[in-house]
Image: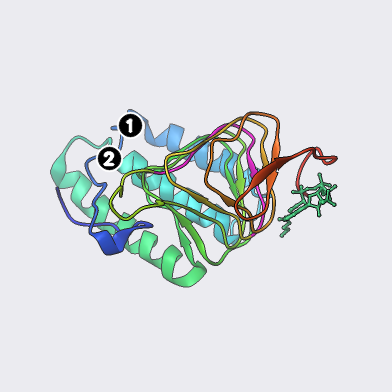
């Protein structure tokens, strides 16, 4: 294992450096992907959520640079930007997270995403959201979110749970169970309700 990147459970000294997929992406594809993220974030390049996602994309991309000599300064740059996003905006989104396309980080502050999480296409997370481990003795267990999952402000999702496509997670919910597609969960612990809303906001 190589140097540590702070992730949701950094206090456990878990290191995900070698767990990331090795991308095979050209620089042009990286720019196109970041442009897509920029559009998804309302074409606002100063939005903290966009910056967090862009840094994540860069972190994934640089792992595809085969030459260690070339990759080293890119990794240094990535770590500096990662720390800047975490310390300035309060968004922890390590590059080991499997991030779908057009994922939106809406607002900022107290956002923690475990390095083993999966976030599907068009998923939205908001301020105060934690996607993390549930038990300290299972440090690699992390939530898997499908496509178009809409996570309300302050929601917490813990452990190796699967959230289906098109799920609404209510504000401040604490989700500890798998959630089937096309449903809404609210409360502590979260329960499935019959929702009137198509989406959260
Ligand atoms: C989850 C949510 C989408 C449900 O909306 P809805 O389908 O219109 O649901 P309703 O308002 O009809 O509520 C259904 C029931 O769930 C309860 N409920 C709704 N949201 C809840 C929440 N976040 N936590 C706890 N209970 C909640 C309601 O009190 C109601 O309970 P009842 O049947 O006992 O009266 C919505 O309430 C929500 O939490 N949105 C989050 C928005 C958000 O995060 N905004 C951030 C903007 S920055």
Give the number of the disc on residue 191: none
Q: Would you place residue 194 above or below residue 85 in this image? A: above
Residue under pointer 2: 63
Observer-nearest residue: 64 or 144?
144
Place of residue 155 in the rendered image (x, y in percent of width and height, measured from the top left): 60, 55
Q: Quadrant of residue 127?
A: bottom right
Is residue 87 shown left or right of residue 105?
left
Does the beta carbon of the residue at mark 2 sit less than 8 Å from ligand 1?
Answer: no
Chain-order first, disc 1 or disc 2? 1
Observer-nearest residue: 66 or 154?
154
Range of magenta residues: 142-153
Q: Which residue occupies 31% across, 55% down?
A: 136
Give the number of the disc on residue 23: 1
Place of residue 189 in the rendered image (x, y in percent of width and height, measured from the top left): 60, 52
In terms of secondary structure, what is the magenta stretch mainly? loop
Distance Cα–Cα, label 1 vs label 2: 7 Å
Asked if residue 149 is among those painted magenta in the image, a careful observer would answer: yes
Q: Which residue occupies 35% across, 56% down?
A: 7
Circle 1 residues within 10 Å: few <14, some 14–19, many ≥20? few
């Amino acid at each position: 294992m190589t140097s540590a990147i702070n992730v949701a459970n950094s206090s456990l000294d878990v290191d995900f450096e070698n767990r990331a997929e090795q991308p095979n992406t050209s620089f042009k594809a990286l720019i196109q992907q970041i442009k897509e993220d920029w559009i998804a974030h309302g074409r606002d390049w100063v939005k903290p959520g966009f910056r967090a996602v862009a840094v994540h994309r860069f972190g994934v991309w640089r792992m595809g640079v085969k030459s260690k000599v070339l990759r080293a300064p890119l990794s240094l740059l990535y770590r500096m930007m990662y720390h800047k996003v975490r310390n300035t905006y309060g968004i922890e989104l390590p590059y080991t997270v499997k991030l779908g396309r057009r994922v939106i980080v809406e607002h900022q502050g107290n956002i923690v995403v475990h390095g083993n999480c999966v976030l599907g296409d068009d998923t939205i997370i908001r301020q105060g959201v934690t996607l993390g481990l549930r038990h300290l003795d299972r440090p690699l267990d992390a939530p898997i979110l499908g496509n178009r999952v809409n996570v309300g402000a302050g929601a917490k999702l813990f452990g190796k749970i699967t959230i289906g496509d098109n799920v609404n997670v209510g504000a401040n919910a604490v989700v500890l169970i798998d959630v089937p597609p096309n449903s809404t969960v609210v409360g502590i612990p979260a329960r499935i309700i019959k929702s009137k809303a198509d989406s959260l906001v």
